[in-house]
Image (cartoon, grey):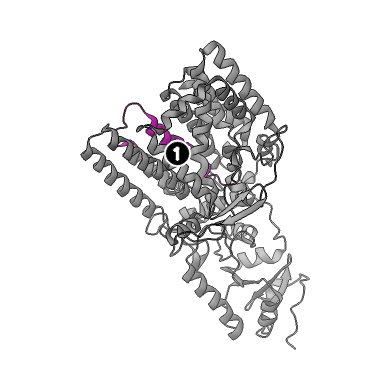
Amino acid sequence: MTAAVLLGAAAFFAYCGWWPLIATNIAWLDFGDRAMHQLGWMFFRAAPWGMPPGSSLLLGIELANSIALVDGLPLLAIPFKLVAQWLPQPFQYWGYWLFLSFILQSLFALRIARELGAGCLIALLAAAFAIITPAYLFRIPMHMALSSHWVVLAGLFLYVRRVPPRLWMWPLLLGLTSSIHATLLAMVLAIWGAALLQRLWLKRTPFLKLVAELLLGLVISAATLWSVGFFGTDSYAAYGYGSYRLNVLWPVISYGWSQIYPDLDHTKFDYEGLSFIGIGIMALLIVAVGSGAIARLRAALSLRWLPLTLVTVGLMLFAFSKTIGVLDADLFTIPMPAFIDALGSWFRSTGRFIWPLLYIVTIGTVVLVGLRWRAAIAVPIVLVAFVAQAVDSYPKWSEFMRHMRPPAATWDIELKSPFWERAAAAGYTPIRSIPVDIAFGSDWKDIGYFAITHGMDTDVAYLGRTDKDAEKALRKRALEVLATGAFEPRTIYILNDVRSALAAARHVGPDDLLASFDQRMVFVRGGRHLADGLDPFPFWPTD
C-alpha cells in the first residue's frame, strides 16, 4: 500500500511537476477546458448560496446553472466555498485533486491485481501500467474532473473482491462519483449493476442486503446529483454523438502515444475514444498468448465473471456509437432505438465508455503474465515491458509539464484598453453579448476572467449544458433589444457581428458609445465618457 502511494505521488510529480500544488497559481489553468473548469469555480465561489447548494447564479446570468454542469468538481468546490472567506484570492484546488487522483489510481489498480492473485511486485507493476495508460494521461490536461479514472478502478475493485463488499462501500463510491462527473458515474453504475447480478447469482450476499444496497445506492446517487446541481437544466442532449466515438481498432491506434509504433490514421473526433494499450501491454499480451497464460480467460464466461464481461462489452459497443468507424473511414450508421439515441446525445462523447474494459485488459494482462511464472522470471519481463512503454510514450506524457507556464496568480487576457477598467470602476455590469455568445468557440475565457475579477456578471460563457428554453428566450431578447433599442443601462454589450453593430448604430444617442476596443465592438448606453482620451474605432453612421 505504501509503495502504491509513493508510486502515485512520484508519477504526479513526473507528469505535472510541483507548480500545480501552489494554491494561488492559476497560470497553468489558462487553457482550453481547464480554463472553463477554473472559471466555473471562480464564479461559483463569488455567487450567493442557492438551492440546491451546487447552484451557480452568476456565470451565464439567465443561463447560469450549477458547478456540476461546468465540470467544476463539486466534491471539492462546495466544501471550499463554505470556507471561501479564509481562502486566498485567487485559489485553485485542481492540483491537489490531480495529486490525490494519481495516488488513488495507483492504489486501486494494485488492489485489483492483488485480488486477482498477483504477487506484490507484479501488482505494483500493474499499478504502474494503470498510471501510464495513455487514456488516463491524455485526459488530465483536458478535463480534470473526468480524468478521475480511479473511480472506475474502485468499482472494478469492489467487483473483483474475493470477500463481498460491505453494505456502505458501493453507496459511498456512488455518492463520491456523483459529485465528480456524470460520465464516470454512468460507468460505475454499470459495474455496480454487474456486481449486484453476480452476487445474486452466486448467493454471495443475502437478498435483503442486496435490496438495501440497491435502494441506498440509488437514493445517495440521486440526492448527491440534486445537491451538486446536476438537474439544473431541462436537457442534457448535445452535439457529438456519432463523432466523439471509439474506433473499431482502438487498441492499436496510438494517436501519437508511441515513437516506434505506426501512427495509424483515424477520424477527426474519435480521439475521445483514445484507448491505445501501449507497446508494453502489447508485448505482454503476445507473451501471454505464446505461453498459454491467456487460457485463464476462459473464466470470463463463468458465473462470477460473466456479468462484468457482458457489461464491459456492452459499454464498448455503446462507445462505438451509431456510426461505426475503422481507421479514418466511416463504414456505416446503425439506426438506433430512441432511448439509445437519447443516451448517446446526453453523453455525446461515447468513446469514453471503453475505459472499464481498457483497464481490465491493462491490469489483467500484467496479472496473467505474473501468474504464468514465478516472480523471479515474471517480474523482469513485466518490468522491461513497463520501461519500454514509459520510454516510448515519453514525448507525449512529458508535454504537460514541459509546456506548463510559470506560476502566476493572474491570466494574461486580450482586454488591454483602459475602457474596460473604466467601465468596471464606474459600476457597469453585466457584460452581455449579441448574438448570445456561448460554448467553446466564443469569447468566454477573456470576458469571463475579466468579469469575475472585477465583480461583474456576464452571459458570455462556456457551459457544459444549458437550459434550452432559457437560451432560446435570451436569444429572442437580444434580437428585441436590437430591434427596439431597449439596451439596458450600465450594461456593456459586445456585438459579435457586423449586422448586430449596424442594427445598434440606429439607436445611438449623443451620450452613447458604439466603438471597437481590442477588436471587440461594444455598445454602452450613456457610456460615451468611457472613451474620453482614447482613440477607439468610431461607430458606424446610421445612414
- Residue 87 drawn at (x, y percent): 49, 45
| Residue appearing at x 44%, y 44% in the figure | 187
Q: Which residue is mark 1?
A: 151
Image height of 143 relative to 298, above or below? below
Q: Quadrant of the C terminus?
A: bottom right
- Residue 266 drawn at (x, y percent): 67, 47
Image height of 105 relative to 143, above or below? above
- Quadrant of the rendered structure where residue 491 is? bottom right
Image height of 60 relative to 258, above or below? below
Give the residues drawn in magenta, as a range.
141-169
Res. 79 visible in picture: no
| Residue appearing at x 35%, y 32% in the figure | 304
- Quadrant of the rendered structure where residue 299 is? top left
Q: Nearer the viewer, residue 370 or 147?
A: 370
Report the residue that reaches farthest toward the bottom. Answer: 543
Report how many numbered discs are placed on residues in the image.
1
Residue 470 among magenta residues: no
| Residue appearing at x 26%, y 33% in the figure | 203
* Residue type of the residue flagged with mark 1: Val
Res. 71 visible in picture: yes
Q: Nearer the viewer, residue 533 or 466?
A: 466
- Residue 26 drawn at (x, y percent): 61, 45
Secondary structure type for disc 1? helix
- Residue 443 drawn at (x, y percent): 65, 62
Q: Quadrant of the N terminus?
A: top left
Label 1: few (<14), some or many (≥20) within 10 Å? many
Report the residue that reaches farthest toward the top. Answer: 376
